[in-house]
Amino acid sequence: MKSALFAAVLGAAGFAAGAASADEGFWTFDNVPAAKVRAAYGVDITPAWLDHVRAAAVRLSIGCSGSVVSAEGLVLTNNHCVADCAHDLSPANADYFTDGYFASTRDREKTCAGLRAEILTAITDVTAPMQAAGAKLTGAALIKARDAEMASLANAGCGTDRKLHCEVVSLFRGGQFKLYRYRVYDDVRLVFSPGDRTASFGGDPDNFNFPRYALDAAFLRLYEDGHAVASPEHLRWNPTPPVAGQPVFVAGNPGQTFRGLTVAQLETQRDQAAPMLMSQLSELRGRLIRFGEESDADRKMSGDALMGIENDYKIFVGRLTALDDPAFMAARRAAEADLRAKALARMGSAFGDPWAEIAGVQGAAQSLFVEERMIEGGPWESLLFNDARTLVRAAAERERPSSDRLPEYADNQLALLERGVLDPTPVQPALEQLMLEFWLSKSREYLTADDPATKLLLGRESPEGLAARLVGGTRLGDPSVRKALWDGGWKAIQASDDPMIQFALKLDPEARRIRERAEDAVQGPTARAAEAIAKARFAVDGADAYPDGTFTLRFSYGAVDGWTYRGKTVPPFTTFAGLYDRATGQPPFDLDPRWLAARDKLDPATIFNISTTNDIIGGNSGSPLLDARGDVIGTAFDGNILSLGGDYGYDGRVNRAVAVTAVAISEALTKVYGADALVRELEAR
């Protein structure tokens, strides 16, 4: 949600700042630089190789990636991607989040409420109709015309088939548009989690660092009509230890990146957006830590949320570090000036100056940012508020023709929205109240007490009192109540006396007004200028460019490698022996008792975690790490601290991806967890 907010408010435009070099790039599967890979590593990435990998690559609705690794729908991903599911499935007498879970039989595989898996089946170029839509329009009118065309194309691509999902993706920020067609699986069940203690060994101190000793791997299974999905097109499991210099490949879904922002947009992020969001995350982290200290139950309740907030905070620290680096900003200014000069030389004075146009809307972007973040953005994490807003907006939007709706409520999106609202995800009232209190208090602080939006939010109530009233009075935690409101539509919403529904109803007109102002003053003008910048890039670099991340399937190539920084060389491997050496017995360096008991059975030389030069970012979590044959030799779960500026650019000298190896996973499954049957399924040929 945070990254999407940047795009919405700042009108992010552009893509890779120059022609890609070294191992850089989030390459789309229909534009993989096979010649570069062959020249660098001697590996032929053929269309058949790509089709095979694509058919087994998984996008998870919680912002992660994965891969099908058996003939029976078994999916490999990261543990931190299933931690919320493990938490929600925990009974009163067990803590699956901390201690893990293993379904020794199929009947014990438990459905993760709200989790959806998608496999990409086709990519179709729809640039022509999308660029033609609203060709003579600007501002909010342009955004609305393109939103309507997106909905029409997506509906034509998938129709009403609930097993399919189509979305039109803007690549190169309007330079290209592609229709992505997915096969959807909405019954996803937890098979194995080692638990947070083992998967996040080292906790926040080790997060985004290396050496690492984390078994951040988990397994899910896809089901349909109550049966495990047959998946003959799956990736082979290869528990062979990787070696230094070995070519490796990643197929995953990098989230939104900002490598192609203009300098003016970067300055807006540096001076306003990033500091504000980092400050909020820092305070929210403190509140969650304090909340978890109240009792073991509160610690258990808040563990997954705290892990996510700590991770996001570190990401923003990395982003701001890059933006505050004079050398980084100087390089971006030089690259922008070079492109402008080349574009003018190639395209003539009639091309204009789209960079100046984007600079011209930054004042509006900055003035709208706080309102957009606090009113339209809503709380950081609140199931109850999010469900209320979705129910209110879905009911209102369904009163209109699909082409006139907000794009996320078009006909082709309704099935996914309905699933999300009606899934029986457990609600934690105390945690909900904390999140709402924080959002309301920060809204009052940033907007000021006298702002009309603050008065709309709070009336004469305090943040604490309003949050308590909303959470204490709402019935939206009951799926049957949500279903009745969804089925009843606008009439049922208007008649509802649920305080959370009434609150969302009261807030929605103002949130929509702010959204439309942003479309008219920022997004519309930026979209038009971004399209021009894309044309300039294509004219200068041709196909030797990749688009920013969009949480769609991408290909990355690289090698197993360490790095040298400030005179210190970091090797690319860690081993089981290093895990035991690092353990202190105190959190976050305390070992699961099963690992202590299994120490003598494990080979201490087993390669545990590795670093690679693959270009990945948030959203790639759970992506398969592949060898030259396309076999799975691990799963990516993190980057080093130097990769945190990867939102804005890739430095092949020091940016590294971090993965847990297949050999370590197999060893642990067999000798620590006794999951021999799972290993046999993985290694079946």
Image: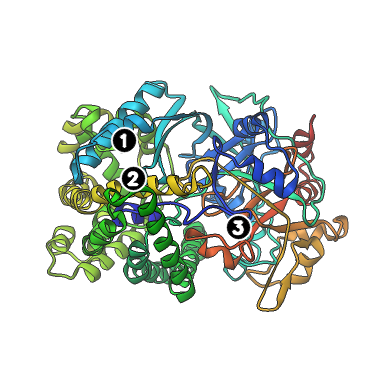
Question: Amino acid under label 2?
Answer: Glu
- Residue 468 visible in image: no
Number of residues whose C-alpha sits closer than 10 Å to that of mark 1, classed few (under 14), some (14–19) or many (20 or more): some
Going from N to C along the chain, the mark reached first, 2 or 1, is 1
Q: Is residue 673 visible?
A: yes
Mark 3 or 2: the one toward you: 2
Which residue is identified by label 1? 131
Which class describes the residues within 10 Å of circle 2: few (<14), some (14-19), or many (20+)? Answer: many
x 85%, y 60%: residue: 605
What colour scheme governs how the chains and residues are painted in the rendered image of this protein? Answer: rainbow
Mark 3: which secondary structure?
strand
Residue 372 position within the rendered picture, expressed as x and y whole percent measured from the top left: 25, 57
Of 659 and 501, the residue lying toward us: 659
Marks 2 & 1, CB-CB < 8 Å contact: yes
Work out whether 465 lies above or below 240.
Answer: below
Q: Earlier in the sequence, mark 3 or mark 2?
A: 2
Query: Residue 619 location, x and y as percent?
Result: 52, 49
Q: Quadrant of the C terminus?
A: top right
Q: CA distance from mark 2 to mark 1?
A: 9 Å
Which amino acid type is marked by label 3?
Answer: Asp
* Residue that mark 2 sits on: 531
- Height in image: 453 above or below 272? above
Q: Secondary structure at mark 2?
A: helix
- The label number, if any, that marks residue 638 in the structure image: 3
> Is disc 1 placed on a helix, strand or loop?
helix
Residue 135's x, y, as percent? 24, 36
Real-space CA distance between mark 3 and mark 2, rounded to the nearest whole angstrom: 33 Å
Name which residue type carries label 1. Gln
Earlier-in-chain disc, 3 versus 1? 1
Q: Disc 3 or disc 1, which is closer to the eye?
A: 1
Towards the viewer: 84 or 206: 206
Residue 238 picture quarter: top right
